[in-house]
Amino acid sequence: MRILLLLLVFALSVLPAEGQTIWSRPYEPNQFAVEVIAPDAPDDASVLSGATFLTGTLSLNNNIEFAAELPVARYGATTEGVSSQTALGNPYVGFGFSSTTLPVLVEVGARLPVAPSNNAARLGGTADIGRTPAFRPEEFAPSLLLNGRLSLGQHSTLRLRTGAQYASRPRAGGGTDRDWRLLYESQVWREGDRLITGVSVAGQATLTSPRGTRHHTAISIMGNWRHVQPGLVTGMSLNELFRGGAVSPFAGLTLSITYMRR
């Protein structure tokens, strides 16, 4: 509730928000983004194991944006007798509804039940940081997310995002498992003449049984070019950090391409 109230306060004072994936160029419509994330993989997985996310957005008018994402995971086996695997994750299809006068964007969409249950999908699930879960096997998951941003000076902005996801998937042996999840993110972006830098904290909490949370922090750096923005992202899990366990780092490459610039 506090986050929702903050977003309403921000709506009184700042510029319109645009839709974006969490690691692409911020507040930019009409983008195609490729993100390759390598999580902390098991010892029997190769260095080329990880997940790739292909995301596209298209502004239908000044207030409505179409978004689609295709996640793909790869598990490269290094153990003799174990086969490498790939897995198509649950695609996302949705719309963003924004105001031309308020800094609020509402995202409505769903993940379609495609992902299998194998090693690649399980590894991909550790790389879907800052997203609605993309690799839960055969899971249909509609979501509703609210975005807002606040100017922190001439070149810096704070973006807050929160919302809920409902998930339904078949249970082994019959029946259906259902979950409610709360997602929340905070990002500070600074746009310089040559570089765009960002610091992010992303979390999700399962509100139904079995309850659990995931929290990550990351640093993003990308080139501030007019149409193409290559970048790097690196971060770690906060769960293990605060519980005294082994830290789970991740790293990735990003590429955002802007087309039909307004």
Image (cartoon, helix red, strand yellow):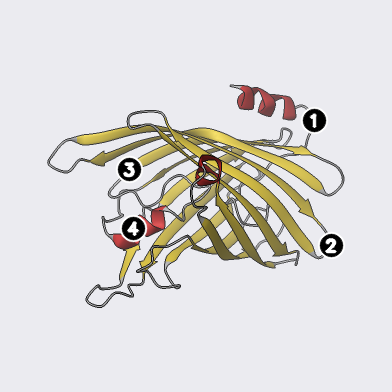
Residue 124 makes an appearance in the image: yes
User: Label 4, on which residue?
Assistant: 121
Q: Is residue 80 above or below residue 41?
A: below
Residue 13 is labelled as 1
| Mark 3 closeness class: few <14, some 14–19, many ≥20 residues within 10 Å | many
> Residue 255 appears in which quarter of the rendering?
bottom right
Q: Which residue is mark 2?
A: 193
**Which marked residue is nearer to the observer: mark 2 or mark 4?**
4
Q: Nearer the viewer, mark 4 or mark 1?
A: 4
The secondary element bearing badge 1 is classed as: loop
Residue at 56%, 64% (x, y): give it: 252
Q: Amino acid at mark 1?
A: Ser
Q: Secondary structure at mark 2?
A: loop
In the displayed structure, 79 sits above or below 151; it is below
| Label 4–label 1 contact, CB within 8 A | no
159 or 218, nearer to the observer? 218
Give the amino acid at mark 4: Ala
Image location (x, y in percent) of residue 205? 46, 34
Q: Quadrant of the C terminus?
A: bottom right
- The label shown at residue 140 is 3
Q: Distance of mark 4 from mark 1, alpha carbons?
A: 42 Å
Q: Amino acid at mark 3?
A: Phe
232 or 53: which is nearer to us?
232
Assign a secondary structure to mark 3. loop
Image side of residue 97 versus residue 113, left or right: right
